[in-house]
Image: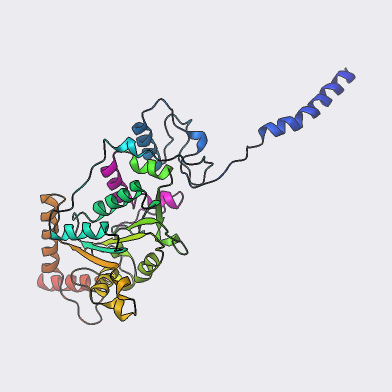
Amino acid sequence: MGTRRGRDEESMEHERPARRQRTDPPAVLWSIDPLPAHAAPDDSLPPDEVDRRFERSFRFGTPIPGAGGAAPLDGGPSHSAAPFNWARYARTWKSFDGSEDEGQRRYQHLLASEDVTVVVGLGVAGTGKTLLAVQEGLERLRSGRVRKLILGRPAVTADEDLGFLPGTERDKITPLLAPMLDAIDKVMGPGAWAALQRAHLLEMQSFAYMRGRNHDDAFVVADEVQNASLQQLKLLATRLGRGSKLCVLGDGSQPDRNVGANWGAGPHGTISSIERFARFIEDGGLERAGVAPGTAACFQVAHLTKCFRSETAAAAVAAFDQIERETVQPRGRGETGSAVVLLRQAMEQAQRER
C-alpha cells in the first residue's frame, strides 16, 4: 500500500507542471476592439442581425446572444480587424441632399470642399447639421480619403444628471453620441456604426481625454459645441493633423452649460464659445492674428436657420424662441447669472399678487 501510494504521489507530481501549463492563459494581443475574439457571434446569423445584436449589447451592457454570454469589453483580447465590406451596405445606403435652402447648400458645399479644413456649423434644431456632416464623413471614409471617422461631444447633459455612469470611457460617452450614431445608421443601415467600430474605422472621443491626441487623416465631427468652453474649443481645434477635416457644430440658442464663457448663453445672454469663434472668423480675426490669407480661407462658417425635421419641430423652435423673448428680461450690469433673473422674476410676481 505504501509503495502504491508513493507511486501515485510521484505520478501526480509529474502531472502537476503539465496541468499548470495547460491552465495558464494563452498569450493574447490587446486592442481597442470592443468585441473579444473569443466572443464571435454565431456564423449562422445574418450580418445585419449580428450588428444589431452587438449594438444593443454595447448600448445596454447585456450579453451578446450566440456569443457564449459575453458582452462587449473595452480593451479585451482581440483579433486583427478585417477589411471593411462596404458592398454589404450598398442596398441600404441613403444619400441626403442638403439643398432645402441656401444655408444648407452652402453648408454642404463647405463640407465637400477640399480647400476648407474647418467648418463651423451654426443652426437651430432640425437643420441637418449633424446628419450632413456625418454623411460627408462616411463618404470620405468609403472612398479612402480618410482613415477614420472621429465623433466627439462635450459631456454635458440637458439640465438633468443621471449620476455616476459605470463602465469605460466609451460606455460613458456612447449615450451622448447617440444622435451621431443614429445618423450613421440612417445613412448606411441598421447596425452600421457598430460594424465600423469593430473595424476600427469609427472612434468616439470625449474632450476630457483628448489632450495630446493627433487627428491625422481623419474626419472629425464635434457636436453640441455650444456647451464647450473656449479652452475646450481650442483643445479640439489644435488636435487637427494633416489630411484631416474638422466640423464644429452647435446651436447657441440651446446651451446646457453655464460655466466660463457660456454663463448665461442664449438669445438674451452672452454668446456661447462657438458663436464667438464663428464671429471671430467672419470678422477677419484670423488675419488680425497673423494667419496667412490662404490658410485663413480654410476656416469657414455656415449658418442654418430653417428647421426641416418636421413641421411640428419647426413650430416648436419658433414658439419657444418667442416665449424666451417675451419672458426673459434683459439683464442689468452685474446680473450675469440665470439664478439672479429667476429670483427677480419671482419677486416681481409676488409683488403683483399682493
Where residue 40 appears, x then y in whole percent? 47, 33
Coordinates of residue 49 in the picture (x, y in percent) = 35, 32
Q: Which residue is farthest right?
A: 3
Does the stretch in magenta take in 179? Answer: yes
Q: Is 75 rendered above or below residue 269?
A: above
Give above or below for 63 relative to 338.
above
Q: Identify the residue at the far bottom of this view.
A: 333
Foreground of the two, 134 or 15: 134
Q: Is residue 174 above or below residue 57?
A: below
What residue is rendered at 33% in x and 35% in y? 88
List x then y, in percent, for residue 77.
54, 41
Camera-nearest residue between 347 and 55: 55
Residue at 12% across, 55% down: 314
Residue 154 visible here: no
- What residue is shown at x 15% (from left), y 71% (from top)? 350
Task: State the residue in front, 84 or 295.
Answer: 295
The magenta segment: 160-189
Q: List x then y, in percent, for residue 158.
A: 28, 57
- Image check: 340 left or right of 49? left
Foreground pick, 311 / 204: 204
Q: Quadrant of the N terminus?
A: top right
- Check the image and report above or below for 184 versus 248: above
Can residue 8 be seen by looking at this rendering?
yes
Applied colour scheme: rainbow
Q: Does the magenta stretch include residue 100?
A: no
